[in-house]
Image (cartoon, grey):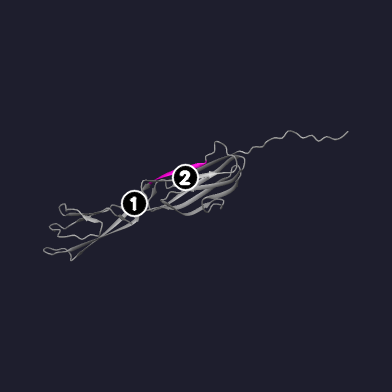
Amino acid sequence: GAALDRVGPRRLVERDAQIVLTKVADPIRATAGEPLLYRIIVHNLGPSNADNVVVTDLFPAEFSVEAVASNSGLCTALPCTLSVMEPGDQERIEVLGRVDGSAVGSITNTAVVTAATPLNPLSVLTATVVSPINIVADLDMRLDSSPTAGAGLTATISARVTNQGPSLAINPSVWITLPAGATLLSTEVPSGWNVLPPVGNVVQITTAQVLT
């Protein structure tokens, strides 16, 4: 008789990948004007390959990216396409940048990962880091007197204030203590600076400006 080809039942093969995204900041507390490092890890827990994996990062306006690198060498900028991640694969991405010197409060940074492969509901596709901001401004003041103060003489005292950073100095104030027995005759300050009435022999000079 005629030979018959027997075809078994067809099975639908489904793919399923569990992607977990984590992110940390180093240091935990950022300093305005100083470097900050973000570490991003993308891990495929399987059981299937994850195709067309893309990592993006929503950097805060107060953060300037200086360099991006990863263990595979695929990520030199963000967004970054990792192509195929097999089960167990990890991509470790480091983003080095600098916090703006005017940053205050905290900065929030969120990374997001997507894939073309259907992902397990247990996948973690976003990671957010909130970094509190330290403000550290190193103010240097130089005083000069011409001529050197002496009994019965009129002297001009000059003060020069410099911010050595790394952060901006917001609303700085200067206190100058006059020699005992000295009398303040007049003052001359830059625009935006104000001289408060002396308290004893102490003169305070304030401003609402920001010293860079």
Q: Which of 3 and 23 is in front in this view?
A: 3
> Picture coordinates of residue 175 (x, y %)?
22, 54
Question: SS class of the residue under badge 1?
Answer: loop
Callout 2 amino acid = Thr
Left or right: 27, with 142 as reference point: right
Callout 1 amino acid = Val
Q: Is residue 129 magenta?
A: yes
Crowding around mark 2 (Cα neighbors within 10 Å: few <14, some 14 to 19, many 20+) is some
Left or right: 88, with 62 as reference point: right
Left or right: 99, with 47 as reference point: left
Is there a contact, CB below 8 Å, between mark 1 and mark 2?
no
Q: Give the range drawn in magenta.
A: 125-132
Left or right: 18, with 180 as reference point: right
Q: Furthest-front residue in view?
A: 2
Q: Tell me the quarter of the image containing the C terminus.
A: bottom left
Q: Furthest-right residue in view?
A: 1
Question: SS class of the residue under badge 2?
Answer: strand
Q: Nearer the viewer, residue 148 or 73?
A: 73
Residue pictured at 34% horizontal, 51% vertical: 136
Magenta segment, prevailing SS (helix, strand or loop) = strand
> Picture coordinates of residue 188 (x, y %)?
20, 61
Q: Tell me the quarter of the image containing the N terminus.
A: top right
Q: Is residue 152 above or below residue 137?
A: below
Residue pictured at 51% horizontal, 47% vertical: 56
> Picture coordinates of residue 187 (x, y %)?
19, 60
Q: Which of 146 and 2 is in front in this view?
A: 2
Q: Report, in whole angstroms, how far the alpha carbon at label 1 lies from the one at label 2.
A: 25 Å
Residue pictured at 64% horizontal, 37% vertical: 14
Q: Mark 1 points at which residue?
A: 136
Q: Specify the label residue 110 is tagged with.
A: 2
Q: Does the magenta stretch include residue 122?
A: no
**Mark found first going from the N terminus, 1 or 2:** 2
